[in-house]
Image (cartoon, grey):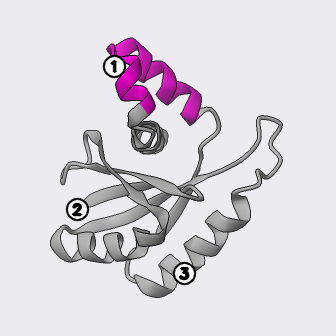
Amino acid sequence: MRLLAIDYGKKRTGIAVTDPSQIIAQGLTTVDTSQLMAFLKDYVRREPVERFVLGLPMQPNGQASENLARVQAFAQKLQKTLPDIPVDFYDERYTSVLAHQAILQSGVGKKRRQQDKGLVDEISACIILQSYMESR
């Protein structure tokens, strides 16, 4: 069964998943946050998901970020909607910075970076998932 990571944002949310053996994390997509729950319900109907890993937004000093309340509210809704799949939180500090660096190092052109703002969210979710797997 797969692990599915969520980099929850006010407008867009990045999604990453593992392979069924939980060895490799890969970006899946970026979803408009207003469509996120419908996307997740549809995805778990098609693919077995063992656990959701939800990025926990914290400031560098360890204090809660402005998005924390939204993430916690979403986590409660997710647990009510899909109660058979547990939700773990994982510190997402610096994932956006790492995602930007990865995009730059991969050679993605400036025009595509400007057009595809969701790419950072998807890669951030992948970094969250990979870090979560390494911590286990």
| Segment colored magenta | 95-114
Residue 5 x %, y % = 42, 54
Residue 82 lies in the magenta-colored region? no
Quadrant housing residue 61: top right
At a point 26% along the width and 48% down the height, the residue shown is: 22
From the image, tell me which residue sits under label 1: 108
Q: Examine the rendered structure and indicate whether residue 88 appears above or below residue 123.
A: below
At a point 40% along the width and 43% down the height, the residue shown is: 122
Residue 6 x %, y % = 46, 56
Crowding around mark 1 (Cα neighbors within 10 Å: few <14, some 14 to 19, many 20+) is: few
Considering the numbered disc 2 on the image, is that residue within a helix, a strand or a loop? Answer: loop
> Given the image, on which type of amino acid does mark 1 rest?
Val
> Given the image, on which type of amino acid does mark 3 rest?
Lys
Q: Examine the rendered structure and indicate whether residue 69 appears above or below residue 76.
A: above
> Given the image, on which type of amino acid does mark 2 rest?
Met
| Among numbered discs 1 and 2, the one appearing first in the sequence | 2
At a point 57% along the width and 72% down the height, the residue shown is: 74
From the image, tell me which residue sits under label 3: 77
Residue 101 placement, left or right of 60: left
